[in-house]
Image (tube, rainbow, N blue to C red):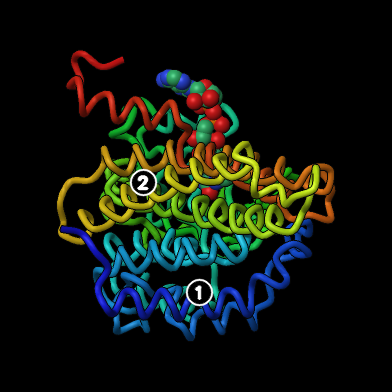
């Protein structure tokens, strides 16, 4: 039977206290600016161990495992400030470097990612392909001790702010998935230009396009073996997908709490609107679905923790969690009436933010393809 351990409960309470004290009060104001979050705040988050979950102790991390704790932390941060720096952000590079990088790469990047001084991004999507990631065209051609990278990436979360990216490029352009190789790229490298995208949500997260123009990267920055990049990407994507769901569900939970507080004090036709079933039942239904999806998420993370297959559960969580969150926040906004539609109320921005969770890390349709393949078998699935 699944339940949180004493240690997980304690960690969750600690993160919640921190997030409500340090993040929530400034969330609305920060959500509309493109500035990165202050380093001071990142350091405080690092002190709580937030950027080192699952990463090696020798570099300041909390050691292997801890995926349920990761989910709890992401959910609490999502509830306090959906745009705040998030443990799954440092893990983007941290996890890949830990699992596929050598000691030199680990020494160069892990301490900074874990102590909050450095941030990372995952660089897959290109202007002409997102869902079909195997169709990427960015090339890495080997020239002696260097690879020369050329191509254009886009829609990269934290692309404007990150110091390091895990970049996926073709070392064999005719080989499809088997031609994709992963690289650790310091983002101040000559030949790399970043251009900001101006988004409706996730605004402080600096989504960007990255242009590689004859970028010379030493072979030491290749992750693992040539041609294995796509395999590496997929092996660590599932748990990250679950955290995307929990991140959005946290924001939805906070929005329903806002709606409950508002409905208890707003009166219409002589009584608080909470006394109308049309209001209260909406909140009851969303809360039920959110709780069900949370359980699905934590079961998927628990499976990951036990080293058991969890791709199907992760895909279920990834499409359902953000969808439920969009629906819940939409209704929370409507419960706030005309005030909900104004920028004075945090809900309109939160709604824009969670739509991003529906798309980032794979759309609902792609998740349903994964689920269908598990249910029907590859031969019979769409
Ligand atoms: C907020 C946000 C953050 C992101 N962060 C990152 C990041 O950090 N790094 C990164 O590399 N990328 C990132 N992305 C990009 C994201 O991963 C892609 O946008 C996503 O995978 C979809 O790809 P696409 O936009 O090219 O859409 P397309 O692949 O062109 O799809 C368009 C539509 O067609 C549907 N579709 C496509 N194929 C199928 C199919 N086989 N069956 C049914 N429907 C299908 C899709 O579901 C979608 O609705 C981010 C995107 C957003 C919005």
Of labels 2 and 1, the one closer to you: 2
The circle drawn on residue 292 is 2
> Is residue 78 depicted above or below 336 in this figure?
below
Q: Secondary structure at mark 2?
A: helix
Q: Earlier in the sequence, mark 2 or mark 1?
A: 1
The circle drawn on residue 76 is none
Q: Secondary structure at mark 1?
A: helix
Rendered image quadrant of residue 373: top left
Q: Residue 153, can we see it?
A: no
Q: Quadrant of the N terminus?
A: bottom left
The residue lying at 45 percent from left, 31 percent from top is 364
> Is residue 306 depicted above or below 50 in this figure?
above
Image location (x, y in percent) of residue 96: 34, 59
Image location (x, y in percent) of residue 265: 74, 59
Distance between the alpha carbons at the discs numbered 2 and 1: 21 Å
Q: Is mark 1 within 8 Å of ligand 1?
A: no
Between 117 and 283, the residue placed more toward the observer is 283
Q: Is mark 2 within 8 Å of ligand 1?
A: no
Image location (x, y in percent) of residue 232: 29, 48
Q: Residues within 10 Å of mark 2 (few under 14, many from 20)?
A: few
Which residue is tagged 1?
16
Image location (x, y in percent) of residue 314: 32, 44
């Amino acid at each position: 039977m699944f339940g949180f351990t004493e240690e997980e409960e304690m960690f969750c309470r600690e993160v919640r206290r921190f997030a409500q004290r340090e993040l929530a009060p400034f969330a609305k104001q920060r959500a509309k600016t493109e500035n990165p979050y202050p380093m001071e705040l990142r350091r405080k988050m690092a002190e709580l161990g937030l950027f080192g979950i699952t990463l090696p102790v020798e570099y300041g991390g909390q050691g292997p495992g801890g995926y349920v704790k990761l989910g709890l932390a992401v959910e609490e941060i999502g509830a306090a400030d959906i745009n705040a720096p998030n443990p799954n952000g440092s893990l983007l590079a941290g996890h890949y470097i830990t699992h596929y990088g050598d000691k030199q790469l680990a020494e160069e990047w892990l301490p900074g990612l874990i102590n909050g001084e450095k941030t990372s991004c995952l660089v897959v999507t290109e202007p002409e392909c997102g869902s079909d990631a195997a169709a990427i065209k960015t090339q890495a051609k080997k020239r002696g001790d260097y690879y020369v990278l050329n191509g254009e990436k886009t829609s990269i979360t934290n692309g404007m702010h990150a110091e390091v990216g895990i970049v996926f490029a073709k070392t064999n352009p005719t080989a499809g998935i088997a031609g994709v190789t992963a690289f650790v790229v310091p983002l101040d490298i000559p030949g790399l230009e970043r251009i900001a995208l101006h988004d409706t949500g996730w605004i402080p997260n600096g989504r960007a396009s990255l242009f590689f123009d004859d970028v010379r990267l030493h072979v030491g920055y290749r992750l693992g073996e040539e041609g294995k990049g796509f395999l590496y990407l997929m092996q660590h994507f599932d748990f990250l997908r679950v955290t995307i769901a929990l991140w959005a569900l946290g924001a939805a939970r906070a929005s329903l709490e806002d709606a409950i507080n508002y409905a208890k004090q707003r009166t219409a036709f002589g009584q608080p609107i909470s006394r109308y079933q049309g209001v209260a039942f909406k909140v009851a239904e969303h809360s039920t679905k959110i709780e069900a999806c949370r359980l699905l998420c934590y079961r998927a993370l628990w499976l990951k923790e036990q080293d058991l297959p969890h791709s199907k559960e992760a895909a279920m969580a990834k499409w359902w969690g953000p969808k439920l969150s969009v629906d819940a926040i939409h209704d929370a906004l409507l419960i706030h009436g005309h005030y909900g539609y104004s920028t004075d109320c945090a809900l309109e921005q939160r709604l824009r933010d969670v739509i991003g969770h529906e798309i980032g890390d794979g759309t609902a349709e792609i998740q349903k393809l994964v689920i269908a393949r598990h249910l029907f078998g590859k031969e019979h699935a769409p």
